[in-house]
Image (tube, rainbow, N blue to C red):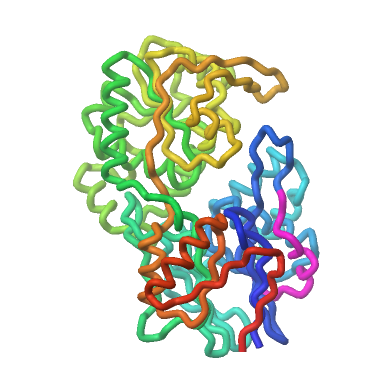
Amino acid sequence: MLEITVFGAFDSVGKSCVMISDHDHRILLDAGIQLHPRRTGLLSTPPEGVDDFCEEINSVLLSHAHIDHSAYVPALYRAGYQGLVNCTTPTMDLVEILWKDHLKIEGPHHYGISHIHAAITKTRTHKYHQKFRIADGITAEFFDASHILGSAAILLDWEGTRIFYTGDFNNAKTPYHDPMVYPDPDEPIDILLSETTNANRKMGNRKAATSNLTKSLLKCYSRGGKAIIPSFALGRSQEMQAYLTSDFDSFLQKFPLYIDGMILDMNKVYRRYLNDEWVSPRILMELKDRGYRTPFDHEGLRTIDEVSHTGRRGKKREKLATQNEEAIILTTSGMLEGGPIFDYLRFGGNNPLNGLFIVGYQVEGTIGSDIVSGKKELSLDNGFGEFFDVNLQLEVRKFEFSGHASLEGLIQMVRYSSPSYIYAIHGEPEGQLAYSQALDTIGQKATILSSKEVLHEFP
């Protein structure tokens, strides 16, 4: 008898954490945290109840590095877990950066540096499409989920029962990835645990979004302004750099692209794994044709440290934001909840020549969501306890990019894999309902976990 226990993301996006167990084994899929909008003053929240099982869990499988899937892993060791963490090789390098950064931001709310070290020591890495043993009778295999570098959907073979956990996946072509590859259809999936992030969202066409962003950047340049692009450090920022360095080979000579924030650390990891084991051969060929090994080698791409000003980075940002030079600034955070973007809004937000171009989803209640909704008056801090008021006068535009599958992609996976049981997770209730209704039209049924009654059994 197999049991599935969902500790987080059963009716929301955030703190993903699923346990599969039988009489002898407990396997954990992901362990993320839920971040809260800055204005709430709340610390992040963990998966509910997983600590009670940490001493009994045999193994942890990590789908990818994003905070809502990975950031609680060190805390498992604080709660008594002693086993291994299994992930792809790039994911290991990425989570180490993210875990340490989160500890710096939030303090030892969930874990300390010793627990990070324990998690790193206990991590084992794997390539795509290479089965590895988890326990007697249980193997796992990672599939490229096309979400971010190293992201994986996880196929478990549990004594003949095939369980497929999507993590976050994308069915669209992106700069670094081809659409996700599904397991062999000749071996149907018994249990599918599918994300439903975009099930009730209309997905824009990436080509159109990129074209519209290009036009807005050109307009910003023509009026002599700065184009400020707040972006997620991991994934979206590297996509933006790939788009901009491919479409603007001559444009970036006049309109340089400055990189700031944790994006710089993530670029180093992407650079390390930019080969055909981890990214599409398509981007490698495109880069070779243009004479680059990575998008980050483009001569029009610069870092904040190249701004000629002595002192800390805050002063460099002030100079970059106020000097009489057109520029694109790609920086964190993606939802404008903190980080370097506050400096750029402080020093450049009141200039109507500038543009604020948002390229990521904005959770309701975040500063980014407020700005997209039209809010102009902001009170921000400088990271040292000092607050300042900003009256936004710059152009604000949002562009539709996503790293998650569309509803059509979610349904395509079901058609392809023919699962016997389907669980809708990692989505808002409206999205899970839309997913379930769409499956009804093809003769499939999804179970929606709409309450905290999270234990489910399978014969």
Count of numbered badges drawn on the protein? 0
Residue at the far left: name it.
Answer: 289
Question: Which corner quadrant of the image does residue 182 belong to?
Answer: bottom left
Residue 332 location in percent, x, y?
52, 34
At 45% across and 58% down in the image, what residue appears?
A: 199
Please name whichever residue, 354 or 288, is drawn nearer the observer in this view of the structure: 354
Please name whichever residue, 283 or 164, is drawn nearer the observer in this view of the structure: 164
Please name whichever residue, 382 or 297, is drawn nearer the observer in this view of the structure: 382
Residue 357 location in percent, x, y?
40, 30
- Give left or right: position of 39 versus 291: right
Specify the segment rendered in magenta: 45-60
At 40% across and 60% down in the image, what residue appears?
A: 407
- Give left or right: position of 264 versus 22: left
Residue 308 visible in the picture: no
Any magenta on residue 54?
Answer: yes
Any magenta on residue 136?
Answer: no
Q: Quadrant of the C terminus?
A: bottom right
**Vertically, is 162 above or below 326?**
below
At 57% across and 85% down in the image, what residue appears?
A: 158
Q: Quadrant of the N terminus?
A: bottom right
Residue 159 location in percent, x, y?
57, 89
**Vertically, is 79 above or below 59?**
above
At 45% across and 54% down in the image, what residue appears?
A: 200
Please name whichever residue, 242 or 358, is drawn nearer the observer in this view of the structure: 358
Residue 370 location in percent, x, y?
55, 30
Residue 108 visible in the picture: yes
State the predominant SS element of the stretch in magenta: loop
**Vertically, is 448 above or below 391?**
below
- Give left or right: position of 227 versus 215: right
**Vertically, is 203 above or below 313?**
below
